[in-house]
Image (cartoon, rainbow, N blue to C red):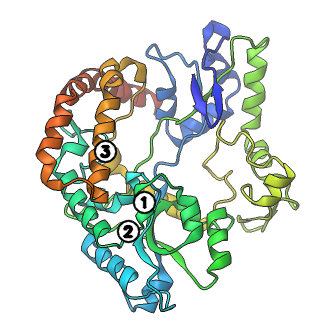
Amino acid sequence: MVRDGGIWIDMRILGAGGYVAPYMDRYTNMRDYYNSIDPGVLFYAADNSGAIYRIPGDVAEPACETLWIRQDWLENLNLEVPKTLDELESVLYAFTNDDPDGDGQNNTYGLGGDGYDLRSFWPWIQGCGDGFGRDTFLKMDDGSYIYGPTTDDCKKWLGRVSKLYADGVITPNIVTDTDRDEEMANGGFGVTYSWVSWNNPSVGPMQSFYSTHPEAKWVPINMVAGDNGTPQDDPASVAAWCYFGITNTCSDPERAYAIWDDMATPENYIHRRFGVEGEHYKDNGDGTYEILVPSDGTQNTEQNIGLKLFQDLFARKDFCNIENTKSTSELFEKVAANSRIAYSHTVEKKNPEAYTVNNDKGTDIGDAMKEYVWGVISGSKSLDDWDAYVQQIESLGVQDIIDELTTIHGAQMKEYEEYMKNAK
């Protein structure tokens, strides 16, 4: 079972041969789309035998986030766009202490972001040491595995970020569970690492922000360089984060699959996602579109028009996403290309249930990690206790998980390489 929002979707699928692959051969819209984006999507959707019992729903772009900065604040303070971590930190202090909005009040912060989400600190995570301080297990070039939160790289970025937080240049609420869309709409900070899609003028958080800050100007900038000299954006997963299936109570599973595959055609997808041309969106005739009724706007939500309905049960990220402006599409391409080194170290699990050691010990390790890491950031714990923290993680069985990854994930990667050879 998988949870999509508030809905539990049953993954038990019946059909010809007990799986949906034969339907994919007859109705090819979804399959062809995924293979055009990345054949690895269907590799991760299949079980160990290669049979496909679940259909990928929403698969992210190769990278979804970028570094944003208030261009108007830079201009007000006569500052240049930062290109390094040191320069970025200098800008954060200026945005906090030098009244960048010119209202004479001490009411601005340098950095804001999604509360209780370490991605908010991605510029430091990717830029300290060799960039292996991510809050997960990582695959190294030599085939070995490490736990990022116990590396010296993690200790280094924690030290820098905790100082920034102690000095008051990061929004205080970042250590609590707050929503980045809401925080962006409210404003009050000048730098954030967040969604590329915010570059679209139809996006709700930006519309809300500009409605109260009409003279402001958020712009995406290149990732800043750190110690390793190869600035990286945060890679997304090739595997879908949600799946949908045809339940074992379906009287005609082939017809159910055919209907959904037909809904995935470019014409039908655009209609389902963006509505009626001329009424909900406008074709400008030059390859660009104007969204007249944003899917997250009140007109859609209050009138129950149905735009974006079932969005996560198959979401195209190609030319059919007409909400993306030309500059937004280019920005997605740029951050995708700039995330490949980081992605090469990402651990993706084809069959999470097979990782029994991780499933047994991973939660306790993750909880201990979050308690310490967020404690250091907020100032309730000390970086001086780093060695004791690492010992705690080791005592909880992190090496056992690494050993399991070496065996299971190592074998999976060989299967993946063979699969990709045949897929090309």
Look at the numbered disc 1 and give the secondary structure of its residue. Answer: helix
**Residue 404: x percent and y percent?**
25, 22
**Tag 3: amino acid:** Glu
Look at the numbered disc 3 and give the secondary structure of its residue. Answer: helix
Look at the numbered disc 2 and give the secondary structure of its residue. Answer: loop
How many discs mark residues in the rendered view? Answer: 3
Say if 255 sits above or below 320 in the image. Answer: above
Q: Whole-Å distance between the Cαs marked 2 and 1?
A: 7 Å
Q: In the rendered view, does 370 fall on the left or right side of 13?
A: left
| Residue 174: numbered disc | 1
Q: Nearer the viewer, residue 26 or 343?
A: 343
Q: Residues within 10 Å of mark 2 (few under 14, many from 20)?
A: many
**Tag 1: amino acid:** Ile
**Residue 203: x percent and y percent?**
65, 63
Residue displayed at 73% across by 47% down: 308
**Residue 44: x percent and y percent?**
47, 28
Label 3: which residue? 371
Which of disc 3 and disc 2 is earlier in sequence?
Answer: 2
Label 2: which residue? 170
Please report contact status of discs 2 and 1: CB closer than 8 Å, yes or no. yes
Q: Residue furthest front?
A: 380
**Tag 2: amino acid:** Ile
Q: Whole-Å distance between the Cαs marked 3 and 1?
A: 15 Å
